[in-house]
């Protein structure tokens, strides 16, 4: 077993969303038309240069309300238990969230986005551009999600 390393994550901003509690968020934000605001702290604003040229961005954040986790998880799409790392549950040993969102507008250090499923006050850890030729895959296997995504909570 390899040596475990400690690490320190420092937020670069905060997410302002219409969702005030974990129960209010959609299971998959891409289906939502709600607008969220991503506030990038002023000291990082220069790093947003040229972001307006992207239609979509990848947002990485900390599920700060997540408490505990289980290695076997029941999801909204299936009654069977699945391994935690084959689900998108926010309850994880390292509760990172990752979502591809549509970039609607930028106003200085504020990004207006559509499709984010984070609650209001969520710490922002990073932003990356979504680049189809890099991020898309033409042949994929969706695992146990096969034939499940049309069912369950949206």
Image (cartoon, helix red, strand yellow):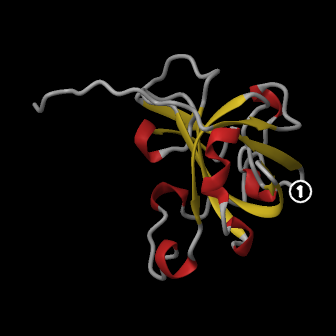
| Image x and y of residue 93, in percent | 42, 26
Q: Residue at x 68, y 66 (%)?
A: 51
How packed mark 1 is, by other alpha carbons closer than 10 Å (few <14, some 14-19, many 20 or more), is few
* Left or right relative to 146: residue 104: right
In the image as oriented, which residue stretches furthest toward the left?
1
Q: Which residue is mark 1?
A: 33
* Left or right relative to 117: residue 90: left
On the rendered image, what quadrant is the N terminus found in? top left
| Image x and y of residue 7, in percent | 34, 27
Helix, strand or loop at label 1? It is loop
Vertical relation: 108 (above or below) 70: below
- Of residues 105 and 35, the one nearer the viewer is 105
The number of discs equals 1
| Image x and y of residue 68, in percent | 50, 17
Vertical relation: 90 (above or below) 85: above
Q: Residue at x 72, y 38 (%)?
A: 118
Vertical relation: 123 (above or below) 148: above
| Image x and y of residue 15, in percent | 74, 37
Q: Residue at x 78, y 55 (%)?
A: 115
In the image as oriented, which residue stretches furthest toward the top?
67
Q: Residue at x 48, y 22 (%)?
A: 69
């Amino acid at each position: 077993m390899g040596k475990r390393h400690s690490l320190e994550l420092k937020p670069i901003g905060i997410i302002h969303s219409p969702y005030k509690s974990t129960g209010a968020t959609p299971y998959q934000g891409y289906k939502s038309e709600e607008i969220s605001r991503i506030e990038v702290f002023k000291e990082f604003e220069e790093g947003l240069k040229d972001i307006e040229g992207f239609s979509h961005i990848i947002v990485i954040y900390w599920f700060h309300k997540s408490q505990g986790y289980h290695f076997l998880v029941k999801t909204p799409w299936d009654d069977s238990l699945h391994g935690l790392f084959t689900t998108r549950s926010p309850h994880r040993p390292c509760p990172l969230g990752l979502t591809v969102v549509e970039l609607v507008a930028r106003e200085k250090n504020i990004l207006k986005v559509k499709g984010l499923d984070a609650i209001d006050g969520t710490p922002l850890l990073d932003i990356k551009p979504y680049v189809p030729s890099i991020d898309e895959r033409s042949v994929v296997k969706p695992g146990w999600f096969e034939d499940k995504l049309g069912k369950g909570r949206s």
